[in-house]
Image (cartoon, rainbow, N blue to C red):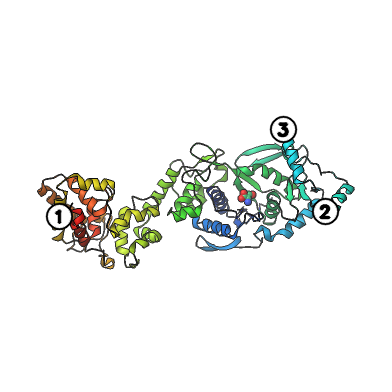
Amino acid sequence: MIHPTPRLRFAPSPTGPLHLGGARTALYNWALARSLGGTFVLRIEDTDRARSTDESLQIILEGLAWLGIDWDEGPEFEAGGRACGGGDHGPYFQMQRLDRYAATAAQLLASGHAYRCYCSPERIEQVRAQQKAEKSSFLGYDGHCRDLTEQQRADFEAEGVQPNLRFRMPDDEVVKVHDLIRGDVEVNTRQLDDWVMVRPGGVPLYNFACVVDDVDMRITHVVRGEEHFLNGVKQRLLFEALGHECPQYAHIPLILNQQGGKLSKRDPGVKSALEYRDLGYPPDAVFNYIALLGWGFSADRDLFTRKEMVEAFRIGSVGKAGAKFDVDKLHWMCGEYIRQWPVEELVARSRRWVEPLLAGASWEESAAFLGNALGLFQERVQLLSELPAKLRWLFEDPAPDEAAQKNLDKHEDAPQWLAAYADLLEGLDLPASFGSDRGAFDREVRLPTPEDCDPPPASVLTPTQLGDRTRALIQDLGIKFGQFVHPVRAALTGTSKGPGFFDCVWLLGKEECLRRLRSPSRRG
Ligand code: GLU
């Protein structure tokens, strides 16, 4: 048998943002398509007219693009640096495919696989209530309209009752399913009722539209959440009724919270793709983390690129058990990714968060200073949105936080130490203040590891040399390093912790240090 080209799809309903679960489904379909050298289709299941919006659609497309999940066919959009979408198997929006559903429904009515059901919602409700009261093992439609006579049907039509179209399930058949993750499973059709394919008015429901589309779009593999497992059985029977081979199904396990329950939007750290974007999560880290929710790259490695994932991904190695979402691990991973970036990349990616701090100064002209400043915090953030709070002291007079104020107040001699330090710095060759003239900050001088970087101009002290001079002063003052550094750091940065003290002094520049150390409020 000639195997068809693998074709996979992600089929979101545009009724809300792209959440973790949806993103993982998209990612696994994408990775499987790419690893098999196949085609990845994006299909929009927009038949829920009350809840589908253009806004949600845009948010989903942007979310996929942000994660670097690109598609070959579907809505046209720029994603992963390429123009995505188009294709010969569309339209890719279900509401543009109503004629296909109508034609297929007519075919199934004619073949007897579907029938018209005239039951009112009230009757359906009654049947269900009775089943519940009787603790029946079967819950669902009782098949009342399965075998109506011509006359009965004509009577309903004459009364103007609009029918639902139902799929006639085999009465008592064991359906054998091979799931790529769950293995061989048998389901008896007695558990499943005659489900509604099309509502009055011609709008198809999920299981029906999905199969018509999977046929038309020549889908060969379907990866989706395990909540669709029984839908897969219904869909398989519909494929058979239409004389088509069913795609291979892979139903992926739930994502769980830390307590082992079903993950919900309210669990800590659970966000949609664009919320992660807006909070400064590196997209590669989110992609990497989501990929691990149910699948492992290797026993000793959790960090990998998209390309490495595609090479290593096997759908059969996705676990059967639910995967626990661990926000701490996600954040750790974000920090790891940020650390790997060259500082220029960190500067470029941080722009959206850091630029407002410049208060109108040119971003481009501040590049060297920003490289120095961001480099100092590269090891200290996990999300880019943490940067403004960490960097604010460089741009604005810091209001000391509680711990810093304690350090300022602790020793009554502290004001004298600040004054002595100001006097020392005044006589040293240090970078000038960037406060009014950031562009002039010496571009040759690089942090965060001053010893590793280009040598600064000979006339300017390195942070290490600054350290030597400072230690000499501390010795002259006859105090301990810690006694000195805590209040001085508090006066200069407003906090009691942060990157290396001498790096901070050096980065802040001479003029600004003098101003802060000599500010009356610091002298007590
Ligand atoms: N629109 C469905 C969902 O979002 C698609 C399920 C499927 O992949 O078949 O759950």
Label 2 residue SS: loop
Residue 303 seen by the camera: yes
Q: Are marks 1 and 2 in contact (CB under 8 Å)?
A: no
Percent coordinates x, y for residue 30 in the rendering: 56, 53
Left or right relative to 354: residue 289: right
Label 3 residue SS: helix
Which residue in the structure is indicated by mark 3? 133
Q: Residues within 10 Å of mark 1 (few under 14, many from 20)?
A: some
Tell me the distance, in whole angstroms, between the alpha carbons under discs 1 and 3. 84 Å
Q: Nearer the viewer, residue 263 or 397?
A: 397
Percent coordinates x, y for residue 307 in the rendering: 49, 53
Q: Residues within 10 Å of mark 2 (few under 14, many from 20)?
A: few
Which residue in the structure is indicated by mark 2? 160
Q: Earlier in the sequence, mark 1 or mark 2?
A: 2
Residue located at (83% from left, 52% from top): 110
Q: Nearer the viewer, residue 181 or 155?
A: 155
Left or right relative to 467: residue 328: right
Residue 89 sits in which quadrant?
Answer: bottom right
Q: Are marks 1 and 3 in contact (CB under 8 Å)?
A: no
The image's mark for residue 419 is 1
Residue 511 sits in which quadrant?
Answer: bottom left
Q: Nearer the viewer, residue 195 or 178?
A: 195
Q: Nearer the viewer, residue 212 or 280?
A: 280
